[in-house]
Amino acid sequence: STSRFKTINFIISRISISIFLLPCAFTMCTLEKRGDLFLLTLTGDGEHRFNPDTIASILSLLDQAKSQSTRGSVLITTAHGKFFSNGFDLAWALASGSKTGAAERLHQMVDSFKPVVAALLDLPMPTIASLNGHAAAAGLMLALSHDYIFMRKDRGVLYMSEVDIGLSMPDYFSAMVRAKIGTSAARRELLLSGKKIRGEEAVALGIVDSAAHDSAEGVVEATVRLGEKLAARKWSGEVYASIRKSLYPELCGILRLEATIIANPKL
């Protein structure tokens, strides 16, 4: 209908949308093992938007990393191109052909992404997000699901678009921000201003750990150095994951994750 096309045009004018081939036709992500390091990469030069198929691919690779983990394992997540991830695949939602269908598809993506966040918090190893470029909405939630976040100094912004496009926040998104971003001022800047936050400001606000790198390669190299340092500690992944989950009780409650009590001291 005419009204439907107006709605679609409005959304497209406010959001940069790319339509991707599904993972069965094109590899959307890869997992590479380099010694103790697992490197999860969102491939291609697109916006790395998440639909149920790409989400399932990421979840499958996280399960693979978990099954192959040993003492000293570390996960680094990065991407190719200009974007780390621009969030949910809104073009896929709109392609349903109706407002009701689009809303149902959006809810489907929100629900199917939740296990990815849970898997990262439950992963028995340190995790590092290496942001090659922009991280927006669910893409930023993917980054925040890691223990450490490094981004570029010269390119890339953090952006929560919900206030600009008229979407409420999923409960686990809000809980993630409360868990990972320490001050009310930083949370306001991220969620209530529609501001695109660059690297140095993101460090100052306590959202990311480092933004001292002038290229995607520089960010990856820095995260690999950190990964190797963490891997050298040869920590028990089970203990590491338990302590991580104990830090975020509200978020883990929403995700239905429990911190296991482990008593196997190394004296």
Image: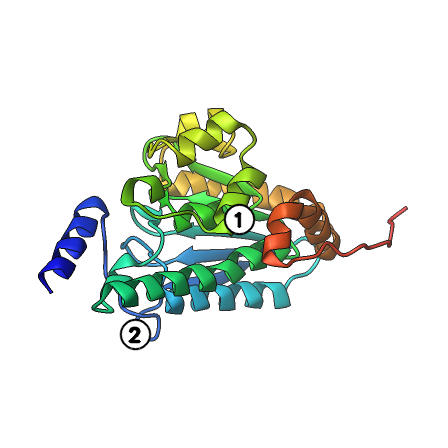
Quarter of the view holding residue 8 = bottom left
| Disc on the earlier residue, 1 or 2 | 2
- In this picture, is 121 found above or below 97? above
Identify the mark at residue 130; answer none if there is no mark.
none
What residue sits 43% from the left and 64% below the top? 55
Q: Specify whether residue 64 is in view.
A: yes
Say if 242 sits above or below 185 in the image: below
Looking at the image, is mark 1 or mark 2 nearer the viewer? Answer: 1
Provide the residue designation for mark 1.
145
Whole-percent x and y of residue 258?
70, 57
- The Cα–Cα distance between marks 1 and 2, rounded to whole angstroms, is 28 Å
Evaluate whether residue 224 shows in this view.
no
Q: x, y percentage for residue 126? A: 62, 49
Callout 2, which amino acid? Ala
Q: Seen from this angle, which residue lies furthest right? A: 267
Q: Which residue is at 87% across, 50% downward? A: 265
**Based on the displayed image, in which of its 4 quarters is residue 188 positioned?**
top left
Q: Say which amino acid is labelled 1.
A: Ser
Closer to us: 47 or 193:
193
- The residue pinned by badge 2 equals 25
Image coordinates for residue 84, horizontal then vertical, percent? 37, 48
Provide residue 245's location: percent of width, then percent of height: 67, 50
If the image is split into quadrants, where does the N terminus sit?
A: bottom left
Under circle 1, the secondary element is: loop
Residue occupying image coordinates x 53% and y 48%: 145
Kindly state the secondary structure of the residue where label 2 is placed: loop
On screen, 106 above or below 187?
A: below
